[in-house]
């Protein structure tokens, strides 16, 4: 028997319904993924997830300084490195919808230096991956290099926030999907 | 010259009183202030801290267990800022530095009740290796009933330390 149960519609607390509706609006979806339904009994967790997604992933805010393609590539590569099948699958679907084919995406996962993006967007993906996986190994000289590449402090703040969101999301998604399944 | 500047108080985005309160009460959090010009970063950070760290009700685990988990994760991730903040809080709770060093070296010797000990153990595993957890790990997280998600006080206002 799985450790987490999926709730029946009528058992979803109003506070959770609010955040599920926000998530649907944010993603433009009609069905909430199981990996989020798994948290309806703790609406404050849904609030944190949705607030982080709205502000750091920036689907709808119109505030991002980087392209949607670059953000999806970065999300896919962090998910791949973190072995989060849920995030990986959703990023792949997003990229396929943008016109990338599976073989090209496999090649990018195997060799993330060959991204079909302008240099500034490639730098976004490269640094997001580094911030997510090796934040402690980033040094002041790395920031000087970012500056030399034309990235501003606000650009880098967005990259840090995006990397933090990717890490945060992989934990919630990986563990919800594991706890919703039985061996 | 540093890449990020610490903003003047008047440059902190409006509507971020919560941030100012946190920054004042925990001066080690220079990183909060560094991100202050980006409200889209500050807002989720404040919400996440208020919702997930939850130093007061309705957490189902003790404050000590949460701060110890924060310390051992910070130690594993080599985050000096988080490590220092957690140590400062634990020192205020009465833990001596050598005892805290011992927890970091061997988290299995924590002076916590079994249930709280389980919390720290899994928080560390979840933070550092979530993809390694298998369904059987959930099945074996005894006592199962007390670790299942519990819905409590949906209208409880979040409180920051």
Image (cartoon, coloured by chain):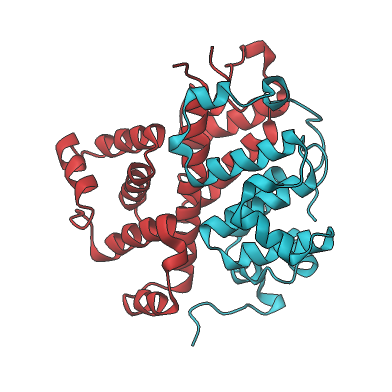
Chain colours: A red, B cyan
Residue A13 place in picture, x, y as percent? 71, 22
**Which residue appears farthest toward the bottom when viewing the image?**
B1
Residue A166 place in picture, x, y as percent? 45, 47
In the depicted structure, whether residue B79 falls above or below residue B73:
below
Residue A137 place in picture, x, y as percent? 42, 67
Is residue B18 left or right of A40 when viewed as pictured? right
Is residue B61 left or right of A144 when viewed as pictured? right
| Residue A6 figure quarter | top right
In the depicted structure, whether residue B40 falls above or below residue A97:
below
Residue B54 visible (yes or no): no
Q: Residue at x 34, y 46 (%)?
A: A81
Residue A16 place in picture, x, y as percent? 67, 27
Of A170 and A116, the residue lying toward us = A170
| Residue B108 figure quarter | top right
Q: Residue at x 66, y 36 (%)?
A: B118
- The quadrant in which the N terminus of chain A is found is top right
In the depicted structure, whether residue A49 falls above or below residue B78:
above
């Amino acid at each position: 028997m799985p450790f987490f149960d999926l709730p029946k519609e009528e058992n979803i607390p109003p506070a959770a319904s609010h955040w599920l509706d926000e998530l649907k609006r944010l993603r433009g979806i009609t069905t909430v993924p199981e990996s989020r339904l798994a948290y309806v009994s703790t609406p404050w967790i849904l609030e944190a997830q949705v607030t982080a997604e709205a502000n750091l992933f920036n689907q709808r805010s119109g505030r991002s300084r980087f392209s949607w393609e670059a953000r999806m590539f970065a999300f896919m590569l962090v998910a791949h490195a973190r072995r989060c099948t849920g995030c990986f699958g959703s990023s792949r679907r997003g990229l396929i919808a943008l016109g990338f084919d599976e073989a090209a995406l496999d090649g990018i996962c195997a060799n993330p230096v060959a991204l079909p993006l302008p240099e500034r967007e490639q730098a976004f993906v490269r640094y997001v991956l580094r911030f997510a996986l090796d934040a402690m190994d980033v040094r002041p000289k790395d920031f000087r290099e970012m500056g030399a590449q034309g990235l501003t402090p606000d650009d880098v703040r967005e990259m840090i926030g995006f990397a933090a969101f990717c890490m945060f999301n992989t934990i919630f998604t990986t563990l919800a999907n594991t706890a919703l399944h039985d061996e | 010259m540093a890449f990020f500047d610490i903003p003047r108080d008047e440059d902190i985005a409006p509507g971020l009183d919560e941030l100012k309160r946190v920054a004042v009460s925990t001066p080690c959090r220079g990183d909060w202030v560094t991100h202050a010009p980006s409200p889209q970063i500050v807002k989720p950070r404040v919400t996440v801290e208020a919702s997930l760290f939850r130093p007061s009700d309705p957490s189902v685990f003790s404050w000590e267990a949460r701060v110890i988990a924060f310390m051992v994760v910070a130690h594993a991730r080599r985050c000096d800022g988080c490590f220092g903040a957690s140590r400062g809080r634990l020192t205020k709770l009465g833990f001596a530095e050598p005892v805290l060093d011992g927890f970091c070296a061997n988290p299995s010797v924590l002076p916590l009740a079994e249930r709280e000990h389980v919390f720290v153990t899994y928080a560390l595993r979840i933070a550092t290796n979530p993809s390694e957890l298998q369904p059987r790990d959930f099945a074996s997280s005894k006592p199962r009933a007390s670790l299942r998600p519990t819905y409590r006080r949906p209208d409880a206002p979040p409180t920051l330390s």
